[in-house]
Image (cartoon, rainbow, N blue to C red):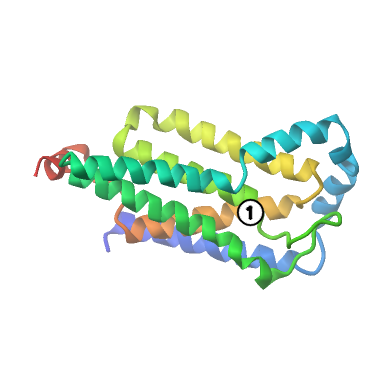
Amino acid sequence: MTVPRVRWAVLGVVLCVAFVALGLLVSRQPLPLDSAIANALQGQWQRPAGTVASVISDALGPVLPWVFGAILFVAALLSWRGGERVRATVLLKIIAVVVLCRLTSVFKPVFGRTRPRDYPDLSYPSGHVVSTASTGVGAVLLCLWLAPRLLRRVAVIAAVATVLCAASRMVLGVHWLSDTVGSVFAVLGVGILTTVALRLLPKPPDPVFADQEAA
């Protein structure tokens, strides 16, 4: 494993450890900041702010990465049929990254954290934030490999969407701040480790990629 890949892998491990450590820390009681924000937003889910938050939450819900993955899968099939085998392989690898990132929310029973208000299901990590962040990671990888000019713009959009999703879940009173932070730790950690394993990071120089595609 080359030095850049080792550094990416170490970062991925650190983020995964941070996700687990934070989950264990908050599993029994919320952090003071969690409680302060929850108290400040108490009852907002029944007010106009809650209506807006609900729209955002629905738009950035758990279905988002699956729709994104389905689109990438169709694009991969078309690329494969068109003879663009390397492009198709990259798309399939990105799908794998998105799916594995999305599956981080299955660890909720490990932490068994309750919601700020009565609500079904467990709290840590936030499935909605995991979904939005997973899609964002996939979109950033897609631009990194196939549309570098859009990389910075898409990265900003992905970050803003994740923050909006996190804020909407807190306004609705169904997640603590640390739930959303832990979700980002989990997605980035698993995402980085998966991209390193699949050799999507670090990306080889463009000429190398072009030569592979031409082959």
**How far across and how far down the image is residue 105, in percent?**
60, 60
Determine if residue 201 is in view: no
Image quadrant for the C terminus?
top left
Along the line of sight, which residue is nearer the eye, 10 or 127?
127
| Location of residue 199 (image quadrant) | bottom left
The residue indicated by pointer 1 is: 127
Outermost left residue: 215
Image quadrant for the N terminus?
bottom left
Q: For the point 54% across and 43% down, which residue is it?
A: 64
Please give left or right for residue 150 compared with residue 45 in the image: left
Determine if residue 59 is in view: yes
Q: For the point 68% across and 35% down, which residue is it?
A: 56
Looking at the rendered structure, the kind of residue marked 1 is Gly
Q: For the point 83% across and 55% down, which residue is it?
A: 116
Please give left or right for residue 111 compared with residue 102 in the image: right
Please give left or right for residue 88 compared with residue 60 in the image: left
Please tell me how crowded label 1 is: few (under 14), some (14-19), or many (20+) other residues with Cα within 10 Å. Answer: many
Please give left or right for residue 205 compared with residue 136 in the image: left
Q: Relative to 144, say whether 185 is above or below.
A: below
